[in-house]
Every structure is written in structure tokens, then in C-alpha cells.
Image (cartoon, grey):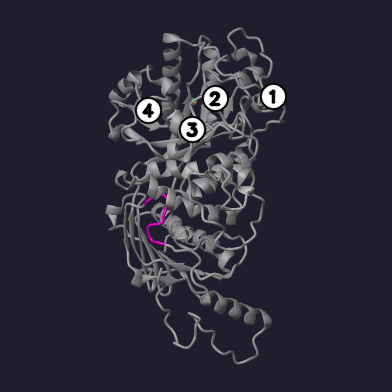
Amino acid sequence: MSTAPSPGPAATPATNPVPLPAVEPDAATLARAAERAAGEALAPSAAHRLADVVPAPQRVQPDPTGDWTLPAEAVIVASPDPAALAVAEQLAGLLRPATGYPLPVTDAAAPAPVDGIALVLDETAADLGAEGYRLDVTTNGVRVTAVTATGLFHGVQTLRQLLPAAIESPTPVTERWAVPGGTITDAPRFPYRGAMLDVARHFFAVEDVLRVVDHLARYKLNHLHLHLTDDQGWRIAVDSWPKLTTVGGATEVGDGPGGFYTKADYARIVSYAAARHITVVPEIDLPGHTNSALVAYPELAPDKIAPPPYTGTEVGFSYVDPADDRTYDFIADVLGELAAITPGPWLHIGGDEAFKVKGEVYTGFVERVQRIVAGLGKTVVGWHQLAPAAHVDGRVLQWWGTNGEDPTTVEAVRQGARLIVSPGNHAYLDMKYAPDTPIGHDWAGLIDVRKAYEWDPGTHVTGVPAEAVLGVEAPLWTESVTSLADIEFLLLPRLPAIAELGWSPRATHDWAGFRDRLAGHGPRWATAGIAFHRSVEIPWPARPTTPVPATRQPAGDAQLPLGSDAG
Ligand code: TNX
């Protein structure tokens, strides 16, 4: 890539020559100047193109005469709006650790890049839509324009990928912070782009969930679905039914201690996600997958006898009593408390694998719960098993089948339901990559990166028109997942594949191109200390672009040196 010459005296290699101080500079200043000069002397560490972005942008117009290098004096200037300024602070927070630059944030009525970065809210740019953005890189700097702070946030994620991989370093590194010139105009294909984390089979600390939120944000996903309850554990505090967590939360698959989120914990996850323009979708799985609730409150069980706690991995044996009004009081209390701490519009009521609640008893149960959700002012989401129950306004079905033929779901869509598409054999992140993948399932087949990428949410379910598809979600069930490193190993590199299906226009879909763009993310993850699976399908660069030690040891096969051919 060619890099535009920096403005400044021709004889000085540094972009921003340090003015001669009147007094002797201190050692730190000298060190800093030397580091900067060294940085300027370096060529950009990897050939970097404006189109090297995941998910692929709608439109990319490179302009090599507009290449720009972030200088140490750069200022980030944003429209005088609290949400836009918050994005500007987030951008500064992303860039400061690796660059070591101060990157002050200011506001201006009409922000313009003056050898810096401008984040511009522009209500007249309505063609960009609620989440879209335009990113212009010129020799003056970078301008991100959007109608909303969400659009600015997505534009910032793109900018982050246009900088060298070393930008992911948690500590300052010597690098020329070059950004390729040109314009990106971008907006999502689907409004709902999500991932699900099952915190019930194994419990994960708030910190781990926040880190998953970071991964979602990086790839412009905007929903985090939390599977909060299952046979093996109840993970969300409900004040009116306290034993759900004190008793029902004390187990998990295997011998682990389980755990649960207090309402304050949950609020922390919700607000951390909201700050990253991600909506939390909480799921209480009903009427099946409820053994942990029955252990805590046997009155909910059909025989009113407490079952033993369950820490295995079978499904479909437990259910709350659909014939007892007390069950619906329980559900109204639980969903009421959950709705009160959930700012997003959705409540997910599960509905899958309730093998012992059949026919009209099942549909009657679901219809009653759907009415409770509507009464709380929320929109119901459920697994596609909900389909035969009567339609309620706005309801969304999450389709997790493994072949795209499903007349019952098609009929529900005809009545007005919208679909989140999560095909078990493409989008399930708990499926193994290959037969020798050490964790994960294979009941829906093996899902390598190509399999995760090669399908179309818009046409996947026969008879469901693309207009009825709200979006796509990648679920991660955690029967065999016990640590953050395990989560990251299964998430990366498949999550970006699903993210691209949700965000990018179909016309950009291209496995060979995706594989090449994705390859550049290995060094980013390695530099940030994020574990990932070094799939043999991806042409990872031979070694990290910058020899920066990561803060933590990546787990899984990411411990192999980059470029090893282990798969
Ligand atoms: C099926 S997918 C389930 C989950 C399991 C998962 C394992 C769905 C709605 N139900 O209970 O954890 O398979 O892949």
C-alpha cells in the first residue's frame, strides 16, 4: 500500500516534528519523540486495504491519495450530543492503549477532521438508516457520519479494523498508525443480529459475559440473548421467588458450583451492552427445561414432588404444571420482575423440547404465557416450537431446525410472525468444527467456518420471504463449555461469519474473499489476548504483525504459534 507523504518539512521523517523546547526536554519527552520518529520510519506492518473489513461493508470506494496516518497530536471531535461524545470516548479508549497518544475528546457544532478524527451526527443523512454510517478517510483525517450514535459506533468498529493489528495491543507499541484512504458507506441487511450465551448449563461470571459483549460489538452484532434458565440451573434473581436462585442456582452441568446474577449484576450486563449499542434478550425457558425451578419450588411440578437436582445433559424430561393456575402466577411474577429490569423490547419464553407437554395443552400454555408477555408491554420471542400457538402481535420465532422445510413455521409467519434464523447445522456455535474438536456437540453435524458462512438467512427457510426474516442469531449452548477460553474458541472465527450474514448485502457474499478478510483478524485476536480456533480453512498470516506480548495466554489451539498448520 502506498502511504501519502506527511505534511511537514521534507527533511523531517516525522509527521509532526516536535518543536524545539525552550528548556531541556525531560527524559520521557525525549523517549516519546524517539519512539514517534521510529514509528514514522516503519512501513505499515501489513498490506491494508479499505475493503479489509468484517462484516463486508455495503460500498467501498478506495482512494490511495487519501491515505492518512494518525498523529500523536490527533484530537477526536464529536457533535455536541452526549451519545456521540460517549462514542468518541469509546474510540479514544480503544486507541489510547496501543498508541500511547493522549487523544483528547472535544465537541464542536460542525466537527471536521483536522489531522484527527471527527464523529458527526447528521440528521439529514437519513439514507444511512438507523444503524448505518459513512466513513471518509482523507489526508486531513477520518470523518464518520451517521444519523444516530449507533451508526457512529459501528463506524468506529470499522475504523478500528482499518488500523494496523497492533492497535489491539493493551500496551504502547511502535507502529505507523496508517489508515487507507477512501470512503465506506455502510448499513445492515437485517435489523436483528445476535448471539446467544447459555449461562444455565454452565454459569459464567459477569466479566465473562461483558467480554462476549465486546466480541459482538466488534462485528456489529446488536443483540445478546441470554439463556438464563434450564434444568441444570436458574441464573437470574427473582425477589418474589427467592429459592429459584438460592436453591435452583446452586448447580450446573458436572460438579461445578453454579451461580446466579443478582439484579445488580444483570443491570451491569444490560448497561454495558447498551453502551455498545447491544440489546439484551433474556430467556426464561418454559414449560420444559425447568428442573432447577422444580427443585426450588415443588409446587410447580405436575406431581408436586421435588425432583432431584439435575446436572446431566439430557433434555425434555422436566416441565412446570400447565394445569395449575399457580404456575401462571409464578410465570407472571418472574416475567414481571425480568421485564422491569430489561429495557429492551423482547422477552424470550423458550418453548423448545417440552416433550411431555403436548398438543392443545402445550399451545394453551404458550398462548397464556404470550398474553402475560403482552400484558407487560414486551414482545414475545420463542423457539420455533411456539409456531402452532395462536399469533400475538409482533411475535418472533427463533428457527433452529436443520433442514429448511417447516410448514408449521411457514404458517405462523403467514399469520404475522417474524423469524430469527439460527439453523442448527450452520449457526450453532456449540457444534464441533471437526471430528477432533475437543469440546462441543455434533448432533446437528460439524460446522467449520465455511459451513457457518455458506447459507443465506433471507432464503433459508422454504416459504418464508426475506421480509419476514428479522435477522440471524448464533446460539452457544454450554453443556461442554466451562471457561471463557472455551467460549472464545467456539465463537472465533465463526461468529464473524454469522455477523457477516446478518450485516452485509448478499451481493458481497463470497467465501474466498471472506476467508482472506477474516485471516487478518487472527493477529488482532492474538494481540488482544483473545483465544480462537486456528481453523485450517483460513490463511492466517505467518506470524503476528507486531511482536507484542498479549496480556493473557490464549487458550485452546490459539496457543500454537501463528502459522502452524494445526487445525
Ligand atoms: C437443543 S436448540 C436445545 C438445547 C441444547 C442444544 C445443544 C434448543 C432450542 N434446544 O437445549 O442445549 O440442543 O446443542
Question: Is the residue at mark 3 in contact range of ligand 1, meaning its CB lies under 8 Å from it?
Answer: yes
Q: Residues within 10 Å of mark 3 (few under 14, many from 20)?
A: many
Marks 4 and 2, the one that precedes in the sequence = 2
Marks 1 and 3, the one that precedes in the sequence = 1
Q: Amino acid at mark 3?
A: Tyr
Residue 9 lies, with reference to residue 418, above or below; the image says: below
Marks 4 and 3, the one that precedes in the sequence = 4
Q: Amino acid at mark 1?
A: Val
- Residue beneath disc 3: 428
| Front position among marks 4 and 3 | 3
Q: Residue 423 appears at what percent x and percent y? A: 42, 30
* Numbered mark located on residue 333 in the image: 2
Marks 4 and 2, how far apart at CA: 21 Å
Q: Amino acid at mark 4?
A: Arg
Q: Residue 235 appears at what percent x and percent y? A: 61, 31
Marks 3 and 2, how far apart at CA: 31 Å
- Residue beneath disc 4: 395
Question: Is the residue at mark 1 in contact range of ligand 1, meaning its CB lies under 8 Å from it?
Answer: no
Marks 2 and 1, how far apart at CA: 18 Å
**Between 146 and 356, which is closer to the camera in this rendering?**
356
Marks 4 and 3, how far apart at CA: 22 Å
| Front position among marks 1 and 3 | 3
| Front position among marks 2 and 1 | 1
Q: Secondary structure at mark 3?
A: loop
Q: Residue 505 appears at what percent x and percent y? A: 32, 46
Residue that extends furthest to the front in the rendered view of this protein: 565
- Residue beneath disc 1: 247
* Residue 86 visible: yes
Q: Secondary structure at mark 1?
A: loop
Q: Which residues are magenta?
A: 49-56
